[in-house]
Every structure is written in C-alpha cells, then in structure tokens.
Image (tube, grey):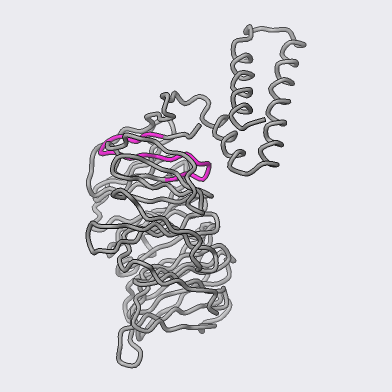
Amino acid sequence: MADNDIEKEIREEIKRARLAPRKPGALKRALVLLAVLAVVLGAVGYAAFRDLNSMDSIRRLFTYNKVAQGEDGRAELFRFDSDRSARYEALGDDLLIVSTTRVLLLGDEGETLWSKTVSFKNPAVEIGGKHAAVYDVGGKELYILNARGLVRDMSGESENGILSASLNASDYLALTTLKSGYRAAVSAYDNNGSPLFTFNSSEHYLTDACVLNDNRRLAAAELGEADGIFASTIRFFSFDSERAISETTLGGAMALSLRPFGDRLAVLEDARFTVFEPDGSLAGSSRYPYPYLRGKSLRGADYAVLLLSRYRSGGASRIVTVDGEGGVLATLDAQHEVLDVSAAGRYVAVLYADSLTIYTSDLAEYASLPATDYAKRVVMRDDGSALLLGASRAWLYVPK
C-alpha cells in the first residue's frame, strides 16, 4: 500500500466520522471509532516499517487536520506588524518575534500569548528544548519563555551587560556577562533558574558558552592569542570543580558560537566546523569548502546545516550538512539565490528567492512549494512542516 493510499484512506475515515449523525447510537459510535482506530494503527505500523518520513506524514495529517489549507498545502497562520529589526523563531507551535521595541509570542491560532515593550539595541533569541531565552546583547534584560508565555525574568543576573545566552536540550542556561573586577563571567542555571556554576575570567574575555546536554559540564570560548597570533581557547568545566577539566586552543581561528550537538559540543569557527567530546577531546572537524559562512542551523536531530558562499556577497552558494562527528554528510550546490536555511528534526528547509524546498538531512528533496517570493525567512518544524515569514504575515506549509 503506497503512502498516498494510506493518507487517502485515513482522510476518508475521518470525513465519514465527521459526517455521522450528531447523536448516533452507542454501537454506531463504537464501530466508527474502531474503523478509524484500525486504519490509524495499520497506517502507523506500515509507516514505521517503511520509514520515519511516512510517520511524520501521518503525524501532520492529524496535527493540521483542522487547519484550512490551500491546494498547495499552505495556510496563513499569523499576522504581525512589519519590523525589519525583528528575529523570528518557532517555540513549539507558537511564533516568537523579538525586535528592538517588542517581544511578542503568538499562539497557533494567532492570539497574543505574551507581549512586552522593550528597548533592545541588539535583540537576540535562543531556543532550547521547550524554552526560549530572549535578551539584548550588551544590555541587561533577559527573559525565559515557554509556549504559554513568560517563565521568569532573569534580568537581575545580567551583571554589567550580557554577552551571550544559550539553552541546551533540557533548557539549562549558560549566561555570559561582563562583570566588575573581571574581564567576564559565565554562569550556569538549571531549568528552574537555580544557579549551578560560575566561572570568573580575570585574564581573557569570554565570547560564548553553553551547558552540554549531559547537564553536568559547561564549555566556554575565550578570546586571546597563541604564539603571537589571534586565537580562541575552548575551556571545559565540570560543575563539581572550579578549574577547567580540559582546554583546546584554536590558533588563528575565531569561535563564532558554541552549542550542544547531541552528547557532544559543536564549535562554529570562521573557517571550519569542529566537534568535541564532553571531556574536551576532539571528535572531528571539517573545513568549509567555500570561504564565507552565510547561514547556519544547528537544530537538526543529529546534524547541522551550513550555507556557504564562494564570494563575500552574492554569487554561488553551497549547502552542507555535517554529521555528529563533524564530517560532511552531504553537499548541494544551489542553482538559485538562497534567502534562508533552517533545520529541525530530520528536515532542512531552504528558502530560495522564488520557492521553498524541504530536504532530508542527506539533502534529498522531500517536498517543494513554488511561488514564494512573498517570503523572506523560513522556520523548519521537526514534523516536516515549515513556517514562511513575510513582512507582516506568516504561512504554514504542510507537505502532503
């Protein structure tokens, strides 16, 4: 039985169940329920036997069954004020918008779940497992949100200004700040906001940090020099020790960001992608085939996606997926201008100037949507659907 036949049969069963009389007898209700249940169980078993992408297709069928979609699978979900400074992220099924003047969380039916007027110079947002950290780089405001709204205001922890904030898969927070009497400091907090660890750096500035997914270690990046040349040093800390358990100097390279990568650490450098084990030993590294990093997403299930360019502006682009050991998983030379990339679960969304294509992690085409010149950004969801963002509206694309 083909995947299309499975979905068609499920749709027909749901349709028949909806068209049943409002007050059927107990026997008829039971028969309708059993029929739907039998089809669902059979389809789920078949999808699990075939592949997980089929399972996601069935998952979308039920999740978005009430969403009014056009023939192309697209449905308008959100409306918002146009703001060029805004950052957009998916928080569960909600849309989080962070700009220089406002933090706005919209529910999956377009309703406002939380809103706050802010005065951010450099708005930033980081997504963890179920929470988001919203903050102003260089400022002192920091808010932790979930899909229902504000969880806690952590602005009181910002010391003399926030350099970076990150969340791991369990929503443990690493907060890097400027601090009086030191060059910088990094503190770790659990998902209830309780402090776990602090490292005060007297000699070097810290640029970024993260709590690893084991919830017992923290990695931080320091700016400095080695043998007379610029270098970044990656330090690993255990919460039960004040001293670093390991450190590695990246000579002549700048660590742009540190993020948990499965049970490892991913370090995004200006010329390569490097993966470390939790103890600080090297797991693997890949140098970029093109010199300019134009975009990235580290939210894949066990991979990352990089958008690289041969030239500083415009020109040819190459999409690269990197596996859990830092090796190249797949590459794709873009034939059209790429506006944005986003990864989640097993899927990679690539927004071209006039279309959207969703790939699997090996960059095999999964679904596509033409005529998307209204969209400027895309946010991938782990079920295979994607949010397309325009100047003041967002549409959900659900592959059939």
**Residue plotted at (37% across, 84% down):** 251
Report the span colored magenta.
380-396
**x and y, in percent, of residue 371 in the image:** 31, 34
Quadrant hosting residue 183? bottom left
**Residue plotted at (31% across, 32% down):** 79
Quadrant hosting residue 164? bottom left
Q: Is residue 368 left or right of residue 1?
A: left
Q: Nearer the viewer, residue 125 or 318?
A: 318
Q: Is residue 392 magenta-colored?
A: yes
Query: Against 361, is 57 above or below?
Result: above
**x and y, in percent, of residue 380 in the image:** 44, 45
Residue 24 visible in the displayed image: yes
Q: Is residue 284 left or right of residue 161?
A: right
Q: Is residue 173 left or right of residue 279?
A: left
**x and y, in percent, of residue 85 in the image:** 24, 49
The quarter in which the N terminus is drawn is top right
Residue 182 visible in the displayed image: no
Q: Residue furthest right?
A: 27
Q: Is residue 129 left or right of residue 29?
A: left
Q: Is residue 186 magenta-colored?
A: no
Q: Nearer the viewer, residue 267 or 327?
A: 327
**Residue plotted at (39% across, 64% down):** 157
The number of numbered badges drawn on the structure is 0
**Residue plotted at (33% across, 84% down):** 224
**x and y, in percent, of residue 110 in the image:** 38, 31
